[in-house]
Image (cartoon, rainbow, N blue to C red):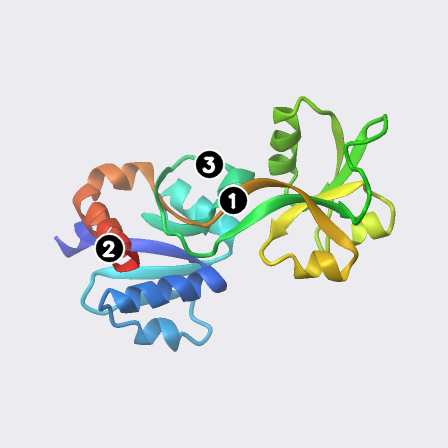
Amino acid sequence: MAENTAIRIALTKGRLEKDTVGLFEKMGFDVTELREKGRRLILTIPGQNIEVVLAKAADVITYVGLGACDIGVVGKDTILEHGGTYFEIADLGFGRCKFALAGKKGTDFYGGVGVKTVATKYPNVTRHFFESKRMDVDIVKIEGSVELAPLLRIADGIVDIVETGTTLRENGLEVIEDVVPISARLIVNTVSMKLKKERIEELAAAMQNALA
């Protein structure tokens, strides 16, 4: 019985991990092992029949999609960029920020003629945003500090995650337009949702009640 109802949940390492562990603690779970994890990547929550896997954001989606984990906590940014096959069942509300189009302060991104160049770590999000505007752009994928692209004149603007806007301002950039809001989401493997429906719904409801 325990084997059939055990839940394996993948958490995005970093801020979302800390927020989720804090939520578990608020729910009355013993999170000692999660807080004192050392270098371990698979942990347990005593007395709850829950196993926790710590992973990078894109891997959380992969593990849930493949059924290696039943549930995942991941940012909407990763969901929008990577897609995948799973159910998105709840907005957990924490980790709030946004995707935004930004450019050098005082410049008119939409002005002039010709195809604009946009630098980003998120080409799919960027492509969909400009497609919705029926606007052709050249997309340059950047792995590091995307704010450099307009400063080095290899892009007219950037699409990136913005929380406070401090990094933009300190580099002479400003938000031109908000693209889409982001927050942590609860995703579930499609097969797990059938086989462990009651257990998953119980856990999801408890998480949302604790948040409320």
Whether 10 is drawn above or below 113: the answer is: below
Res. 13 in view: no
Q: CA distance from mark 3 to mark 1?
A: 19 Å
Check disc 1: other Cα within 10 Å, few if <14, some if 14-19, many if 20+: some
Q: Amino acid at mark 1?
A: Pro
Q: Which mark is residue 159?
A: none
Check disc 2: other Cα within 10 Å, few if <14, some if 14-19, many if 20+: few
Q: Disc 1 marks which residue? A: 181
Quadrant containing the C terminus in the rendered view: bottom left
Secondary structure, mark 3, is: loop
Q: Disc 2 marks which residue? A: 209
Picture mark count? 3
Q: CA distance from mark 3 to mark 2?
A: 27 Å
Q: Which mark is residue 84?
A: 3
In the image, 76 versus 211, the foreground residue is 211
Residue 159 in percent (x, y) is at 67, 43
Q: Amino acid at mark 3?
A: Gly
Q: Quadrant of residue 117?
A: top right
Whether 193 is drawn above or below 28: the answer is: above
Secondary structure, mark 2, is: helix
Residue 85 in percent (x, y) is at 41, 35
Check disc 3: other Cα within 10 Å, few if <14, some if 14-19, many if 20+: few
Q: Amino acid at mark 2?
A: Asn
Secondary structure, mark 1, is: strand
In the image, taking residue 22 as reference, residue 110 lies left or right, namely: right
The earlier-in-sequence mark between 2 and 1 is 1
| Mark in the foreground, 3 or 1 | 1
Residue appearing at x 32%, y 36% in the figure: 190
Whether 36 is drawn above or below 133: the answer is: below
Residue 185 in percent (x, y) is at 40, 47
State if disc 2 and disc 3 touch (CB < 8 Å).
no
